[in-house]
Amino acid sequence: MNAAPQIAIDAMGGDSGPAPIVAGIARASRRDSALRFTIFGDEALIQPELEHHKGLAGLIELVHTSEAITASEKPSHAIRRAKTTSMGMAINAVKQHKADAAVSGGNTGAMMAMSKLALRTMPGIDRPALAALLPTLENDVVMLDLGANTECDAQNLVQFAVMGSAYARTVLRIDKPRVRLLNIGTEELKGTDELKQAAGLLRDADYLPLQFDGFTEGDQLSRGNIDVVVTDGFSGNIALKTAEGTARFVTDLLRRAFKSSLRSKAGFALSRPALNLLKVHLDPNNHNGAVFLGLNGLVVKSHGGASPTGVANAIKVAARMVRNDITRKIGEDLDNFRAHAFNPEAA
């Protein structure tokens, strides 16, 4: 366990430049004084922001580069500039063991390609997956994959389940997470062959530190009766964007309704404490920090438009995973699975 994680930050990856990123670093350091940072980006833009946060003096190292990955840049082109861009340099710091984790709010496709090339996948992992925490009525739920892999076979889904349960044990502190596969129904006969095959493998994997509870449908994701939801990246990304859009729809609808009449405005004044709780619960900044699981190193994806609070939460996720050595836990679980699992083709 690393008591003082060193976090590499891509300061040029956000939609609004270095200002919210530096402010988020300052907020994270106030929450956790043991953290140390290496910031990669344009010194001329970053240094003025650092002047606003004197408390960061002595906690950071600024590494200058004027190059950054753009939001529309193709991963194949971004890879060729990995050694000279702020994103690539942050990821390479993890590869070179100069940092324990990297955080960036930049281009997701480029970040995935760079991370996979630099860090490689862990033994037993065919493809890394993008995992994040989503709010529910009861507790947060880990969902993966959220867009890294559009097509997945049964083995990929089982690997995602193993990685997701390790993430839930680390971040949510759940000893034996409840795992379900996202499907079009809960009946065993429904779904693709890959889903049915993965379900069979997970039902027989009672030696793993997880509880497989079968299938779940999209309308159950927010109920709070699941700890880990596993799906392919195509379905997962659609589900995530739908959930985020629904949250914005609900808040916008409430805002419009409360402005519709004097009586509604009076009702808003009375309901403000409850509505503030709803706003906090649905704010994506309070759940910021998606993780590329399955790599030989830790990389965290922040929302490009994250506020300082969102950036601080992404850093918090990175630090917690470093301290709990999630890479080792995933490796142990995979070794355990490979030692017991049978060949799905033979099955």
Image (cartoon, helix red, strand yellow):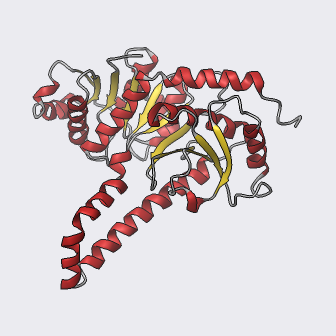
Q: In this rendering, is residue 273 above or below 99? A: below
Residue 65 seen from this side: no
Q: Quadrant of residue 69?
A: top left
- Where is residue 327? Give x, y as percent: 52, 23
Q: Quadrant of residue 55?
A: top left
Figure quadrant of the C terminus: top right
Residue 33 seen from this side: yes
- Could you say which is closer to the camera, residue 277 or residue 26? 277
Q: Is residue 313 left or right of residue 156?
A: left
Q: Quadrant of residue 159?
A: top right
Figure quadrant of the N terminus: top left
Q: Is residue 238 left or right of residue 347?
A: left
Q: Residue at x 32, y 29 (%)?
A: 9
- Where is residue 186? Give x, y as percent: 70, 58
Please, which residue is most extreme toward the right here? 346
Q: Residue at x 76, y 46 (%)?
A: 194
- Where is residue 109? Give x, y as percent: 50, 41
Tally of numbered discs: 0
Please, which residue is most extreme toward the top here? 97
- Could you say which is closer to the camera, residue 234 or residue 106? 234
- Where is residue 164? Give x, y as percent: 56, 37
Q: Is residue 125 left or right of residue 72?
A: right
Q: Residue at x 28, y 63 (%)?
A: 274
